[in-house]
Image: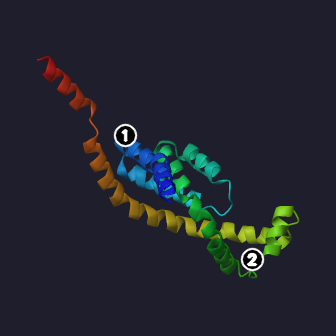
Amino acid sequence: MAISKIRLKTWFNQKISDPLVQILRRGAEPKQLAFSAALGITMGVFPICGVTVLLCGVAIALLGSHCHAPTVMLANFIATPIELSLILPFLRLGEKITGGPHFPLTSDALKKVFTGQASRDVFLSIANALLGWLVAAPFVIIALYILFLPCFKILVRQFASDAPTAKTSELKSKSRVA
């Protein structure tokens, strides 16, 4: 049991903590980081599995310097476990919006999807899930931005003071010479 805890901690540090600390030490603006993290998580919970990285790449290409690409991708990675758990709420939201029938999530329907025998109902349910995500996404990104902004202000201030800047390094080297 202890070995698995150590492995999990090592994995968490390598995949999440260390990249986040590197991002914070590079001195990006808190507003840009908050927007990028909110965008990455919002894109990361897109209800079609396997396309979130592509969506994030398109968003980064379209937004250019308005977002911080490493933060978007890290947030997308962090959102991956949440993605599957939100497919059903997005599906139900889409069904409510369209007034469509309630799609039963059974093992039979799942078998049809995997064997390529998906019926019109399955495709309609996917469309409903997409509609639910499209409606929820603006609210999610705004709420996450509001939540993340004060956090990133504190973190950037904290990690910027920990990292030596070029000016302080230059001053220290000059004082040693004199």
In the displayed structure, would residue 106 be above or below residue 140? below
x and y, in percent, of residue 86 in the image? 60, 69
SS at badge 1? loop
Q: Label 1, on which residue?
A: 26
Relative to residue 80, is residue 112 drawn left or right?
A: right
Which residue is at the far left?
A: 178
Q: Residues within 10 Å of mark 1 (few under 14, many from 20)?
A: few
- Does residue 27 appear in the picture of this structure? no
- Does residue 163 appear in the picture of this structure? yes
Q: How many numbered dots are placed on residues in this image?
A: 2
In the displayed structure, would residue 1 be above or below residue 131? above
Q: Nearer the viewer, mark 2 or mark 1?
A: 2
Quadrant in which residue 126 is drawn: bottom right
User: Is tag 2's residue or tag 1's residue first in the polypeptide sequence?
Assistant: 1
Quadrant in which residue 104 is drawn: bottom right
Relative to residue 37, is residue 105 drawn left or right?
A: right
**Image quarter (top left, top right, bottom left or bottom right) of the C terminus:** top left
Mark 2 → mark 1, Cα distance in angstroms? 46 Å
Please tell me which residue is depicted at 53% across the width and 47% down the height of the picture: 63
Q: Residues within 10 Å of mark 2 (few under 14, many from 20)?
A: few
Please tell me which residue is depicted at 79% across the width and 74% down the height of the picture: 107
Instruction: Indicate the colouring scheme.
Output: rainbow
Amino acid type at image mark 2: Leu
Q: Label 2, on which residue?
A: 105
Please tell me which residue is depicted at 40% across the width and 64% down the height of the picture: 146
Which residue is at the far top?
A: 177
Quadrant in which residue 92 is drawn: bottom right
Amino acid type at image mark 1: Arg
x and y, in percent, of residue 72 in the image? 51, 50
